[in-house]
Amino acid sequence: MKDQHHNVVIIGTSPLAITEAVWQKSKGKSVVNIDDKAVAGGAWTNIKHDGIPAVEIGCHIWEVEKSATDFLKAFYDLNLVQFKPQPRILKKGSSIPYGWKLNLSTLKYVLKRSLRFEFKRMKAGLATPEFSFSIVPRKYLYPKGGANELHAQVMNKIESEKLDLSLNTELKHVKLTESGIDLKLKNGDQSTCDKLILTSLSSIETIEFEDGSSISPETKQVDYIHVHLLLETSIPKAFSYERWMDDEYIHRVSDMTSQVSDELESNQKLLCVGIHAKKYHASSHETLLEAIIERMKNRKLIEGKAKLVQHGFNVFPSYYNSAAKLTEIEARSNGKISVLRSTSFTYSFFNHADRFAELVNIS
Ligand SMILES: Cc1cc2nc3c(=O)[nH]c(=O)nc-3n(C[C@H](O)[C@H](O)[C@H](O)COP(=O)(O)OP(=O)(O)OC[C@H]3O[C@@H](n4cnc5c(N)ncnc54)[C@H](O)[C@@H]3O)c2cc1C
C-alpha cells in the first residue's frame, strides 16, 4: 500500500466489499481492499477453537430478499438451503416465526407515517425489503455449509479475480484534495486514490474535506460475543436459529451441527450462543456456561444429561456508524467517497442488485 495510487480503495473484505471490488475491476479500475484484520471475510469469516471444528464466528441469519439471495447463489456458487426447522423468535416461553417480526415493524411504520400524513414517504419505504407484510412465514435460506461455505467461495473469488488485498492494514485519516484522496494508515504509511468506498461498519478517525473542514465519524465499537458449545447430547426440540427476546444471558442460539457434521462424532452437537455484553462482562466463564446450559436444558434444546465436551468464547469487535453521518460524509465528498449501507447482509446486496446483476446472468 505504501506510496501507491489506486483508482478505488475499498474498506473491508466482507463478501459485500469483495463483490464491490469485482464490480469496480470490471469497469477497468485499479482496486485494493484493505482490512485491519489478518484474515479476509469480515463478519463472515470463521473461528477455530481448540477441539472444535472451524465454524462461523457467531449466530447468523440472512433476511429474506430474493434478488439478493439469487445473486449470492449465482455469484458465489452457494448451495442455499432452507433452515430446518425455520428460525423463530422466543418471548415469555412462546415462540413465533422469525419473519413475523417484519410484520410488526411494518405495521408500526405504516401507523407512524399515516399519523403524520407522510404517505409519499411511506410508499417509498414500503418499496424496500425492510418493510413488508406476510401472514405466511417467509422461508429463510442459508448456505448448507454455513459461513464456512461462503468464506471459502469468497476466497476463491479473490483468487480467480486476482483481487489486490492489503490485510493488517488500518486506514486512520482521509484527506480530500482537488486531485483525489490522500490516505493515512495507522502504521504511518500514506497512499492515494481517486475514490474511497466505505461500508456502514468502516471505522475512520477523521475525514478532511476540500474546504478544510473535517468530520470525526465517532464510530461506535460493538462487540459480538458468542460461545460455541460442543456437546454430547441429542436435541429434544429441533431448532435452527432462535432469537431470545427476554433472557438476561442469551440473545440468540444456533444449531451449527449440520455445517460440520462430517467432523463430529454421531452423538455430538455443535451449538452457538450469543451472549449479552452486560452479563458477559459481569460474570466468569464458569458462571456463564452454567447459566447458559441450564437455560438450554429448560428450553429442551439439549438433553438434561447433556455433557459439555469442549467450548470456546469469542468476542468479535465490529463497528457502527450512524446513517445520518454516513449520508453527510457522502454529500460533502463531491462524489469522492461512497458508502455501501451494510447493517443487514442481504439488504446490502439488494441495494446494489441492478449493478451487481451485471456480474452474473441474472436480471
Ligand atoms: C458476529 C456478527 C454477526 C452478524 N450477524 C449478522 C446476521 O446474522 N445477519 C446480517 O444480515 N448481518 C449480520 N451481521 C452484520 C454484518 O456485519 C453485515 O452483514 C456485513 O458483514 C457487513 O459488511 P461490512 O463489510 O460492512 O462489515 P464487516 O463484515 O464487519 O467487514 C468490515 C471489515 O473492515 C474492517 N475495517 C473497518 N474499518 C477499517 C479501517 N479503517 N481500516 C481497515 N479495516 C477496517 C473491519 O475490521 C472488518 O474486518 C453480523 C456482524 C457480526 C460482526
Image: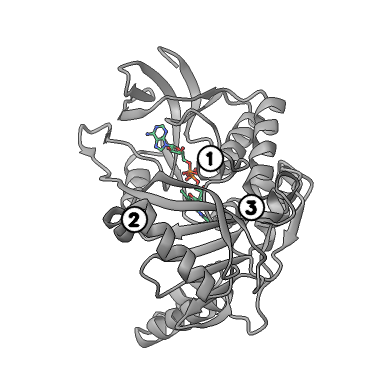
Whole-angstrom CA distance, mark 1 to mark 2, is 18 Å
From the viewer's perspective, is the residue at label 3 or at label 1 nearer? 1
Mark 2 residue crowding within 10 angstroms, few (<14) / some (14–19) / many (20+): some
Q: Position of residue 203 (x, y in %)?
A: 35, 39
Task: Return the residue at label 2.
Answer: 280
Query: How was the colour assigned to the protein in this rendering?
Result: one colour
Q: Is residue 152 left or right of residue 189?
A: right
Question: Which element carries disc 1, helix, strand or loop?
Answer: loop
Name the residue type under label 1: His
Name the residue type under label 2: Tyr
Count of marks placed on residues:
3
Q: Is residue 7 left or right of residue 269?
A: left
User: Which residue is rendered at x = 79% and y = 46% of the image?
Assistant: 361
First of labels 3, 1 by sequence position? 1
Q: Is mark 1 within 8 Å of ligand 1?
A: no
The answer to whether any part of residue 103 appears in the image is yes
Q: Quadrant of the N terminus?
A: top left
The residue furthest front is 305
Mark 3 residue crowding within 10 angstroms, few (<14) / some (14–19) / many (20+): some
Q: Position of residue 40 (x, y in %)?
A: 54, 33
Question: Which element carries disc 3, helix, strand or loop?
Answer: helix
The residue furthest top is 3
Q: Position of residue 325 (x, y in %)?
A: 31, 50
Query: Can you tell which mark lies on residue 353?
Result: 3
